[in-house]
Amino acid sequence: ATRVIGPVLPLFVAALLPESSRVATMAGLVAGASAASSSVGSVVLGRAGDRIGYRRVLLGSAVAASIIYLLQAAVSSIIPLVLLQICVGFALAGSISTLTALLATLTPTEQTGSVFGVSTSVVAGANAIGPMMGASVAVAFGNRSTFVLASAIFMLAVVLIALFLPDRQPSTDVPREQVSIHKNQQPKPIKTR
């Protein structure tokens, strides 16, 4: 859903600032605001997932992103767009960090590589399809419609999470030393020729 608005965001900023020579600067600020808040949100919401459960944080993040994208479709000036991008960046960080933690928690050890491989493939596919879909929707229905589409995708995610994702708390009964590399274990050196 986040890739859907990528190609349209600079055009949307230009439409909000029709007489400005600072369109490129403001488009960079809008895109950067989301990334900056995401770096903070990853830590905060990752810890929240450890405390209250990853599924709850994932649901809350997806609901928040859906609402925020819908609000972005209605903005009429650049300042509210920047503020909403900060908010959506924070919410998206919760989705990324808790989804990764959930995959690690729910995946049997012998299937970790396959599950994370599929996850990476899905992300790569979304990175390819999202911008094309967003641009197509923008051409057909206008730039604001891409924010509505992103909102709808996140709302669909909320429904799928609520229906199919198990509510399982992080396990605290296994000592951390047994999960990760043992303290005294050294990695083996790689032989080179």
Image: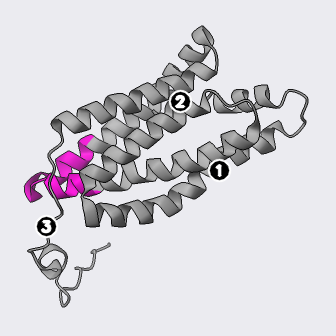
Q: Is residue 142 above or below residue 59?
A: above
Tell me which corner region of the image, top left, top right, bottom left or bottom right, holds residue 137: top right
Residue drawn at 43 percent across, 65 percent down = 44
Q: Nearer the viewer, residue 70 or 12?
A: 70
Which range is magenta? 101-118
Q: Name above or below for residue 169 compared with residue 32.
A: below
Discs 1, 2 touching: Cβ within 8 Å: no
Indicate which disc residue 52 carries: none
Q: Return the disc, 3 or 1, that comes first in the chain's sequence.
A: 1
Describe the element under mark 1 as helix, strand or loop: helix
Tell me which residue sits at (72%, 48%) in the image.
29
Q: How many numbered discs?
A: 3
The secondary structure that most of the magenta stretch takes on is helix
Q: Where does residue 48 sit, x and y in percent of width and height? A: 34, 63
Residue 70 - label: 2
Residue type marked 2: Leu
Badge 2: few (under 14), some or many (20 or more) residues near its Cα, within 10 Å?
many
Q: Residue furthest top?
A: 140
Q: Pointer 1: what residue?
A: 32
Q: Which residue is mark 3?
A: 171
Q: Is residue 154 visible?
A: yes
Q: Residue at x 74, y 32 (%)?
A: 13
Q: Nearer the viewer, mark 2 or mark 3?
A: 2
Tell me the CA gap for discs 2 and 3.
36 Å
